[in-house]
Amino acid sequence: MNQQHIVVTGGAQGIGKSIARGFINEGYLVTIIDKQPMPSWVDDLKGLHYIQENLAFRDSLKSIIDQLDVVQSNPVTCFIHNAGLAQFTSLNSLTMDEWDEVMNTNVRSAVFLSRYLSQVMPEGSSIILIASTRAMMSEPDSEAYAASKGALRSLTHALAASLQEKKITVNSISPGWIHTGETSELRKKDHDQHFSKRVGHTEDVTRACLFLSDPLNQFINGEDLVIDGGMTRKMIYGH
């Protein structure tokens, strides 16, 4: 029997690294796509395939598809689009090239990798797009990033509608503050501002991906799961 196989973009570090490790620990074959050179931690894991490509480039998408064909002996049953380029530039300084790089990395690659993979995925497979609470709340100079994450949330239900006949579920996850550094860097007030009284961990997102990828949960479809310790539900008016 073939191993279950997931593809995760942006898997070299941070949330993506946690997702890759989490699925490997559950016995999955994992393919990581990332623009960074293969990190040393990958050498320690069995069942992991690494593709180094920059999702911002059109030619890279074709190269990725060609390389994925090599590992199709284990059909992909879950695609997790985690790659995300954050560009925080003042509105008056933002260039079209910077805008395009963010949208191509964060959105275009999600569309066309989903299109390709959905053609080879078996029934009962899943697609998970990692969006952000930035799609719902903003700070200055975040136009490109916020727009790209909002696009992913909309893309989620559009893909779910288009792929319903193949019985492929499509959901998104909108993380809030997920800390990827040392816990000692955080202050008490960083934790206390959340209803959950802590900053998020990468494992919080990983567990959600494992849940949404389970065929037993296929009645959840076209939805966005917010993982932010309650921050987007918090009243922020001063007293």
Image: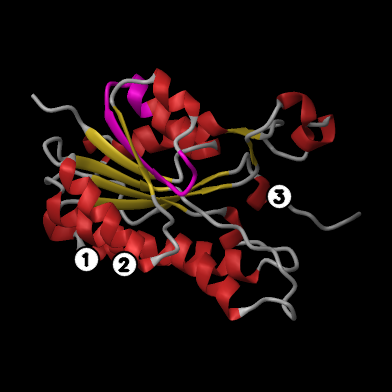
| 145 horizontally vs 234: left or right | left
Q: Residue tagged by mark 3?
A: 234
Q: Residues within 10 Å of mark 2 (few under 14, many from 20)?
A: few
**In the displayed structure, would residue 34 be above or below residue 112?**
above
* Region of the chain picked out in magenta, as a range: 23-37
Q: CA distance from mark 2 to mark 3?
A: 29 Å
Residue sitting at x 27%, y 42%: 78
Q: Residues within 10 Å of mark 3 (few under 14, many from 20)?
A: few
Q: Position of residue 219 (x, y in %)?
A: 26, 46
Q: Residue tagged by mark 2?
A: 158
Callout 1 secondary element: helix
Q: Residues within 10 Å of mark 1 (few under 14, many from 20)?
A: few
In front: mark 2 or mark 3? Answer: 2
- Assess whether mark 1 and mark 2 are in contact (beta carbons under 8 angstroms): yes
Specify the amino acid type for callout 1.
Answer: Ser
Residue sitting at x 51%, y 29%: 203
